Image (cartoon, rainbow, N blue to C red):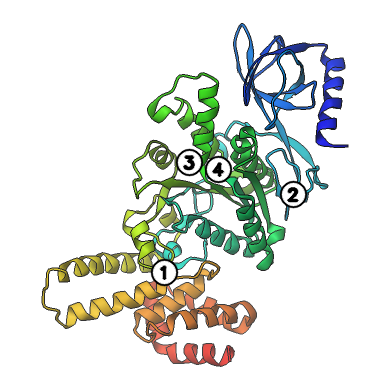
Amino acid sequence: MSLKDTYRQSFIDVVEKNSEIGFVEEINHPIVSIKGLPRAICNEVVYFESGCIGMVTSLSNRNLQVLLFANESVKVGEKVARSGDVFRVPVGEGLLGQVITPLGTSMYQNKVIPGIEEYRATDSIPLPINLRERVQSPLETGISLVDMLIPLGKGQRELIIGDGNTGKTAFVLQSILRQAQLGTICIYAAIAKKKSSIKKAEQLFERHKIKDNTIIVGSGSSDPIASVYLTPYVAMTVAEYFRDKGRDVLLILDDLSTHAKYYREISLISRKFPGRDSYPGDVFFIHARLLERAGNFNINGKKSSITCLPVASSIEGDITGYIQTNLMSITDGHIFFDNAIFKEGRRPAINYFLSVTRVGRQTQNSIRWGINRELSSFLTLHNKTERFIHFGAEINEGIKSALEMGKKVYKFLEQGSEDVYSANIQVILFTLLWIGVLDDEKIQDYRTKAQALYDKDNAFKNKIDELINSSGDFNNLLGKVSANYKDLINYIEEGSA
């Protein structure tokens, strides 16, 4: 039986159950005005006689407005019946490894996925503050520039912002790779993306053997507007299911500026009063209510978190747009992808000086805090030095040394789009770089070899972990690595041979 036949049967069933019928009065696709159904409530699902479904978006004394979940329209005068329940999506362990639509069906087979345990309403109230905890645990993205300079914590909400095609999606997919390797449930909400882009993300997860820890909730640019609008809410609802199971979740919303444009279209068709840039007045509210559902929680003794990385697009590097500044004020910081840096060929193209993390640094231990402080100070000095020599100043040995070290540091911070590194490998390799025993030609090679060895050789892993854990701070680690760097380098070279 097709979904349309299922909805026709549901129409018959709910008419028998509720004995309440309305009629289509006016159509401004995808918004339909319904006369009748006096007991309808907001977000309630309604069934049309033709086999379409919709969701009530607003109520008035005269009629109610319904958002259609279909590209094809209905007819004036068509019968409509209440379901008696708000919009819900299926959740359960069976979603792991799947690519689903916002209606909770398989994207490829258009049917309900087995392994569903319950149905949850997509619009839920964020948990109160007494069930929340301080962000304490670090969240590894596997990307050295972020983990060292703009650290994130589990339960943090960090905005990823930048122009189109500057590597934002590549970054969030890299973060999923690392977190899925560590056992975190990762949910990728692809909002109005090309189906080919969704397929590429799925293939990436398959290639790295992490698909069983990931879920993709996808809507295409040609899908019904309602599906696009619901995508981030469905993804958050699935994340809350795993949170309640005591699991840590990484949720990517790619991207909310596109979501806001679709919501603006719905609102204008619904004849809501337009505000700034024609966005409705409640666009801030809908995103704030959504993102507030993420956080670090302690529910009945079960500690879990939803770390949310919403993505937003800027135009010509302008991060002062209405939606962009809205999201900045809602989140705990932002990572800015700079088009100028991207054109220089640096990957990831993150502008550290214009990026902010408000709660991530409190999750760092003393060693990583020391690295952050040293590296931040050095990059600030290096940036000033580069600006200074543009005026034709003479270069003395001190300036030459700073520029040479800057070249090595930026080389260290560069990464390929599918390369992720564990936190301890990042620390050890940076320490070797900082004491001056790694040159810029060997940095990438040594890091790849060290990570491969760390993954497969328990003796090497234990050696690295013990070296870091036994050091009180970064200066202590520098001393230990300086005394043993030859053994470390020989181990890496011989172990990877």
Task: Please rate how many residues cluster around mark 3, counting C-alpha atoms within 10 Å: few if below 14, some from 14 to 19, many from 20.
Answer: many
Residue 257: mark: 3
* Tag 1 residue: 367
Residue 477 percent location from the top left of the image = 41, 77
Question: In this orientation, does residue 353 appear?
Answer: yes
Question: In this orientation, does residue 186 appear?
Answer: no
Residue 328 percent location from the top left of the image = 40, 42
Task: Please rate how many residues cluster around mark 2, counting C-alpha atoms within 10 Å: few if below 14, some from 14 to 19, many from 20.
Answer: many
The answer to whether the residue labelled 4 contacts the one labelled 1, judged by CB atoms less than 8 Å apart, is no
Q: Quadrant of residue 345?
A: bottom left
Residue 95: mark: 2
Residue 403 percent location from the top left of the image = 25, 76
- In the image, is residue 177 above or below residue 292? below
Q: Quadrant of residue 213?
A: bottom right
Q: Which of label 1 and label 3 is nearer to you? A: 3
Q: Amino acid at mark 3?
A: Ser
Judge from the rendering whether residue 264 lies leftward or rightward of residue 206; answer left or right.
left
- In the image, is residue 348 above or below residue 438? above
Q: Amino acid at mark 1?
A: Ile
For marks 4 and 3 on the same chain, the one whose residue lies earlier in the sequence: 3
- In the image, is residue 205 above or below residue 105? below
Judge from the rendering whether residue 111 lies leftward or rightward of residue 185; answer left or right.
right
Q: Secondary structure at mark 2?
A: helix
Q: Which of label 2 and label 1 is nearer to you? A: 2
Q: Amino acid at mark 4?
A: Ala
